[in-house]
Image (cartoon, grey):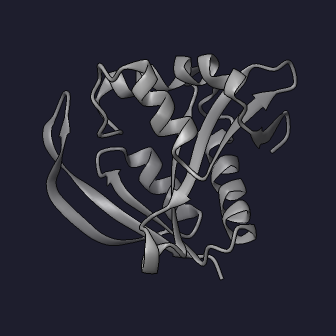
């Protein structure tokens, strides 16, 4: 994780987070959120509703990525967490997503979670699928045609899972 730090996001980080998140949502190839999602809705969903939100920053303060961590389910399923990660386009290939995922696993364990589940990893997002597999996540199921990809139409998505204990 050389060259950048990961820390808890602050409310003042939101404009820089939005600048990274909005183009990813608009592209329509990896997240199920509407491409024209209102900024206020995105802020609530990404920054406020989760249990925690984090940012990865360069030494000069440039935002490289962001992730959030939350229980995957309420009640009897709240020992399993879920995360969403977005790396800035200009920071891809620098190990930011890998570092954020490793960081999220340590944070999740510290918060008492015993497993992590990704509910909708778009199968055509082969970079993400390969990275999560490299970091120990298994594909526990594939949902046929559940993601409406902006360029490819209906594509499959994986549920991926890893025990943290």
Residue drawn at (42%, 54%) of the image: 129
Q: Position of residue 127 (x, y in %)?
A: 45, 45
Q: Find residue 87 and report its image quarter.
A: top right
Front in this rendered view, residue 133 or 75:
75
Residue located farthest toward the front when viewing the structure as drawn: 75
Residue drawn at (33%, 54%) of the image: 120
Q: Position of residue 126 (x, y in %)?
A: 38, 48
Q: Find residue 1 and report its image quarter.
A: top right
Placement of 158 over or under 31, stated as above or below? below
Front in this rendered view, residue 157 or 78:
78
Quarter of the image for the C terminus: give it. bottom right
Placement of 68 over or under 66, stated as above or below? below
In the image, taking residue 84 as reference, residue 24 lies left or right, namely left
Q: Position of residue 164 (x, y in %)?
A: 63, 76
Residue drawn at (72%, 55%) of the image: 103
Q: Find residue 11 and report its image quarter.
A: top right
Q: Position of residue 27 (x, y in %)?
A: 33, 23
Q: How many marks?
A: 0
Front in this rendered view, residue 164 or 129:
164
């Amino acid at each position: 994780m050389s060259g950048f730090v990961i820390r808890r996001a602050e409310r003042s980080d939101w404009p820089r987070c939005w600048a990274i998140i909005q183009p990813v949502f608009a592209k329509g190839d990896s997240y199920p959120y509407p491409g024209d999602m209102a900024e206020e809705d995105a802020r609530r969903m990404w920054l406020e509703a989760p249990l925690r939100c984090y940012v990865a920053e360069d030494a000069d303060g440039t935002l490289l990525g962001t992730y959030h961590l939350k229980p995957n389910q309420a009640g009897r399923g709240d020992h399993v967490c879920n995360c969403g990660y977005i790396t800035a386009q200009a920071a891809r290939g620098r190990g930011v997503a890998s570092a954020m995922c490793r960081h999220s696993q340590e944070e999740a364990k510290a918060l008492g979670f015993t497993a992590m589940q990704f509910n909708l990893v778009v199968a055509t997002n082969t970079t993400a699928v390969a990275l999560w597999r490299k970091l120990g996540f298994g594909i526990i199921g594939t949902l046929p045609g559940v993601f409406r990809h902006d360029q490819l139409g209906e594509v499959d998505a994986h549920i991926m899972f890893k025990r943290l204990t």
